Amino acid sequence: AQSVTQPDIHITVSEGASLELRCNYSYGATPYLFWYVQSPGQGLQLLLKYFSGDTLVQGIKGFEAEFKRSQSSFNLRKPSVHWSDAAEYFCAILYGGSQGNLIFGKGTKLSVKP
Amino acid sequence: DAGVIQSPRHEVTEMGQEVTLRCKPISGHDYLFWYRQTMMRGLELLIYFNNNVPIDDSGMPEDRFSAKMPNASFSTLKIQPSEPRDSAVYFCASNGEGDSYEQYFGPGTRLTVT
């Protein structure tokens, strides 16, 4: 069955430090891949997505993610974290090309130390 | 555009009562999704519509849950009777054909059933 795993439930980084959030998926082919961010009390907002082509994708707010087929991974990175990046981050896959087949990971909560 | 609008933002009700959650999608979007978010199960798709027609309701947990979309600008999710285990945050999201599968989420309704 298709699944998304985010191994880290909670990560704390210092402001200005680099960030990497991990995401692994299970699917027999290459799915469409997404990262969403959820600020407290808000809905989810799309950061970036990957469908095909260049495996390094740029998103909003200075985030980027790299697709590695051999590792079934789509890790999210940011070179320098800002206090406003504190939020919960969700990796998601869409498989089979169907709008309804969007599966989310359990999320990683990011805290930022001053 | 105001984005996806959900009401109410918070709902507290007693077990056995009927609960109705409301959603107004982004104008022109022809897909509408209802999700439930809990700590234990994460973000789960309950049902989605295309052009006001329910496409997949396999995520609806029980017959106590029902959803309707009488027109392109309004949808409801009803729980009758409600139970404490229905306590969760319920999100509505919408998407248009030209949006490359990006879903736009509302702020959610936090439901507490006592």
Image (cartoon, rainbow, N blue to C red):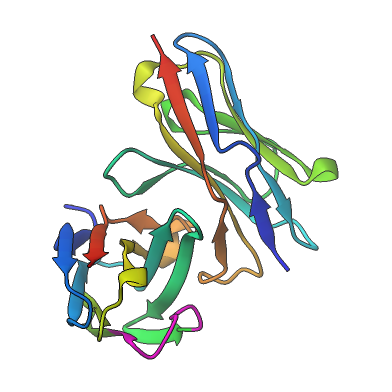
Q: Quadrant of residue B77?
A: bottom left
Q: Position of residue B39 (x, y in %)?
A: 45, 53
Inspect this view and state whether residue A48 appears.
yes
Q: Quadrant of residue A69?
A: top right
Q: Is residue A4 above or below residue A46?
A: below
Q: Provide the residue span drawn in magenta.
A: B58-67
- Considering every residue shown, the one lying at the far bottom of the view is B63
Compare residues A23 and A28 and report the one nearer the observer.
A23
> Does the magenta stretch mainly form a helix, a strand or a loop?
loop
- On screen, residue A1 versus residue A63, left or right, reads right
The question of residue B14 being in magenta is answered with: no
Q: Position of residue A22 (x, y in %)?
A: 65, 35
Q: Is residue A65 above or below residue A51?
A: above
Q: Position of residue B48 (x, y in %)?
A: 41, 76
Inspect this view and state whether residue B73 appears.
no
Location of the N terminus of chain A by quadrant is: bottom right
**Which residue is drawn at the image coordinates 45% and 84% (left, top)?**
B57
Q: Is residue B46 above or below residue B87?
A: below
**Which residue is drawn at the image coordinates 38% and 70% (left, top)?**
B33
Q: Position of residue B15 (x, y in %)?
A: 22, 77
Q: Quadrant of residue A18?
A: top right
Location of the C terminus of chain A by quadrant is: top left
